[in-house]
C-alpha cells in the first residue's frame, strides 16, 4: 500500500523522514524512486524486512525481498535488508509523543518507521 522513505547520514548516524510513496501490491512507481535517486544521490538503499517476534516469516517477508531485488535492478545501487520488527510500533510511539493522535496518520507512521529502520542500519555500521 505504502512505502515510507527516509534519508540518512552515515557520519552522524542520523535519519529524517522524507516521504511516503504509494505502492500497488508492494511495488511503487519506479519513476518516483528514480526521482528520489536523482535528487538525493544515495549510495545505497535500506529496505525493512518484516518478520515475526519469533523469527518466523510473514507473507510480506517474501514481498519485501522481491521488492529489494527489483530496487537493486532498477536503481543500480546496493540494497541492504534490515529486520523491521516493531518499527511501526516504535514509529507510532515517537509520533504520539511529538503530537498526540493528530500525528498518527498512515503516511507519517510509514516514513517514521523508515527513519527507525535506517537508524538501525546506520547504528550497526558505527
Image (cartoon, grey):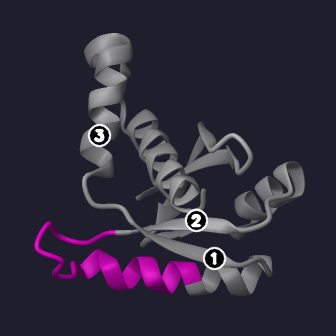
> Does the image show residue 11?
yes
Q: Nearer the viewer, residue 32 or 53?
A: 53
Q: Nearer the viewer, residue 102 or 14?
A: 14
Magenta residue check for 67? yes
Magenta segment boundaries in residue numbering: 50-68
Residue labelled with disc 3: 90
Say left or right for 66 vs 126: left
Label 2 sits on a secondary structure element that is strand
Q: Quadrant of residue 56?
A: bottom left
Depicted 94 relative to depicted 23: above or below: above
Depicted 126 relative to depicted 53: above or below: above
- The alpha-carbon separation of the residues under discs 2 and 1 comes to 6 Å
Say left or right for 49 vs 22: left
The label number, if any, that marks residue 63 in the structure image = none
Residue labelled with disc 2: 46
Residue labelled with disc 1: 79
Quadrant the N terminus occupies: bottom left
Q: Position of residue 114 (x, y in %)?
A: 49, 49
What residue appears at the point 30 percent right and 47 percent down from the top-left corner?
88
> Does the image show residue 104?
no
How many discs appear?
Answer: 3
Give the crowd class for mark 1: few <14, some 14-19, many >=20 residues within 10 Å: some
Give the mark nearer the N terminus: 3 vs 2. 2
Quick check: marks 3 and 1 in contact, CB under 8 Å? no
Amino acid at each position: 500500500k505504502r512505502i515510507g522513505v527516509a534519508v540518512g547520514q552515515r557520519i552522524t548516524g542520523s535519519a529524517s523522514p522524507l516521504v511516503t510513496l504509494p505502492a500497488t501490491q508492494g511495488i511503487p512507481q519506479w519513476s518516483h524512486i528514480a526521482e528520489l535517486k536523482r535528487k538525493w544521490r544515495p549510495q545505497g538503499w535500506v529496505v525493512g524486512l518484516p518478520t515475526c517476534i519469533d523469527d518466523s516469516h510473514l507473507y510480506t517477508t517474501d514481498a519485501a525481498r522481491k521488492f529489494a531485488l527489483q530496487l537493486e535492478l532498477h536503481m543500480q545501487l546496493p540494497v541492504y535488508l534490515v529486520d523491521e520488527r516493531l518499527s511501526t510500533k516504535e514509529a507510532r510511539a515517537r509520533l504520539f509523543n511529538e503530537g498526540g493522535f493528530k500525528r498518527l496518520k498512515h503516511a507519517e507512521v510509514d516514513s517514521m518507521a523508515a527513519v527507525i529502520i535506517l537508524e538501525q542500519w546506520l547504528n550497526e555500521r558505527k
